[in-house]
Amino acid sequence: MRERTFVHIFCSPSYRAGTTTAARLFADYQIVNQRAFRGFDTDPHDSAFARYFPKQAQVVDLNSIQGQIALFDTLLQPDRIPKIVDVWSRTWRQFSQLALETGFFEEALRRDVTPVIFYCAVPGAASLSEAQRIAEQWPQVTLLVVNNEGAAPLGEHGLDLLAKYPAQRQIEIRALDPLVRDIIDDPHFSFAQFLHQPPRELSIVVRAGLRAWLTPVFQQFQSFEMGIALEDAQYFG
Amino acid sequence: MKPAVILVGADKGGVGKTTVSRALLDYLAANNILARAFDTEHPRGTLKRFHPGQTEIVDITSTPDQMKILDTLSTAGPKVTVIDVRAGQLGSTLRALQDMAFLDAVKAGEFTFVVAHILGSSVASLDEIAETAPFVADAHYFLVKNFINDTTFFEWDPQTYASYFKNIRHAGDITIPKLNEMAYEKVELAGVPFTTFVNDKTAQGAPSGNSFVLRGYVRTWQRHVAAEFDRVGLPAILEGRPASVPVA
């Protein structure tokens, strides 16, 4: 079995695409599986992702060379610790340009570091076109499309639109009841903690609703990881 | 391929002559063109610090050193000789080359002669061009705008430009783009060629552990510089093939 280091990049060029929620879910999925990880939040103004994971995540300012070094040089370390990057929509262009100019993805693959892009889709042609550009620019990088129905519903023809994305896999995050939404937006709320020991003060209905929302998302992450594990299995059958 | 001399100079200091010479030596190596270099910052040379294996420090005003350069053009292994001219000595070096009949030999087709004139950021550079013009009639003459340190150049008024260029109408231009300050500084501190820095090696060939981001900036910058040298057809000029920029 190959021992590679994964870099999970959650991104979208669009505001309110649900990028932080997706990154957060994936980070809590790591915690549930008792894995260490390192997180990065590229929003220096409102670092929501870093606030949820103060022990694991750091804020990086891509406008400064120190921030760029702190992010990209760490991502390239083949230390087998998964990395999770929440790329703020306003820094996506810069992140992408830096990756292009420094040859980040090519260098990562040379070092057995596997980047996986979780692209959060929003309605409209621009979102699709950017995903196509990423796929063309870095064909060797795994691209997943995240359909976060709560943050950016794709509308009536959502499935048709999703089918056009050049992604290896789709991750569906269903819309959450607004009441439950408020609970998960609490900066102290942890999905991992919720699964481990649901707060007693939460109503049974809310707990059930949240669990029903969360379980399929984690199952999709697990399914994705199993697919990779199968790819990596040297002796199978 | 006939012997070629590339003169890199300016009459003003601090315009990045040595940086351009370093970029040039890296470019020639990447294109498998063997080159040797002379650093005229006698007695302490900056170019030699970065390219010690192929650089010799000379005093361009002394006859023995002039002989060391010119008398070996045909016999030296590398057919390309890069001369990094000390600040303020471009005009006098060209005059010396004329006095030594080197320019006549260029005219006769014995040698290829390339002049990379690094411009300063002020309009005074135009006067330098006028002073240089009489000596570069048979050279491949390039005006180099060096933005590596984010220099802001004066805007060239077309009429002024035309008046200065009436004698050298076919001068080519090369733009050296800006390089991130921290990346530039790290290479300076490392004291190695840009390519060695990009390859994350020390001068002795050991792993250096430089930042990937900084190396990425240098790699991209080198790519842009190479695109400029490619654009003006430098390899073709050196190999004696028709280039995109004609002789002045």
Image (cartoon, coloured by chain):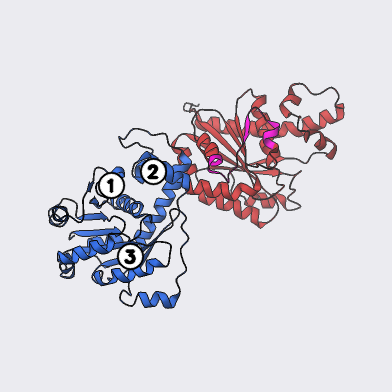
Mark 1 surroundings within 10 Å by alpha-carbon count, few (fewer than 14), some (14 through 19), many (20 or more) = many
Residue drawn where x is 76% and y is 34% of the image:
A213
Chain seen in red = A
What is the chain identity of the residue bearing mark 3? B
Can residue B198 be seen in the rendering of this structure?
Answer: no
The residue where tag 2 is placed is: B188
Task: Tell which circle, 1 or 2, labels the residue nearer the N-terminal end.
Answer: 1
Mark 2 surroundings within 10 Å by alpha-carbon count, few (fewer than 14), some (14 through 19), many (20 or more) = some
Q: Are marks 1 and 3 on the same chain?
A: yes
Residue B34 drawn in magenta: no
Q: Position of residue A105 (x, y in %)?
A: 49, 42
Numbered range of the magenta stretch: A49-68
Q: Which mark is residue A16?
A: none
| Circle 1 or circle 3, nearest the eye | 1
Disc 1 to disc 3, how far (Cα)?
A: 24 Å
Q: Could you tell whether A172 is left or right of A144 in the image?
A: right
The residue where tag 3 is placed is: B142
Q: Quadrant of residue A181?
A: top right
Tell me the quadrant of the picture where the C terminus of chain B can be found.
Answer: bottom left
The disc labelled 2 sits on which kind of residue? Glu
Disc 3 to disc 2, how far (Cα)?
A: 26 Å
The disc labelled 1 sits on which kind of residue? Gly
Disc 1 to disc 2, how far (Cα)?
A: 14 Å
What is the chain identity of the residue bearing mark 1? B
The disc labelled 3 sits on which kind of residue? Phe
Q: Which mark is residue B45?
A: 1
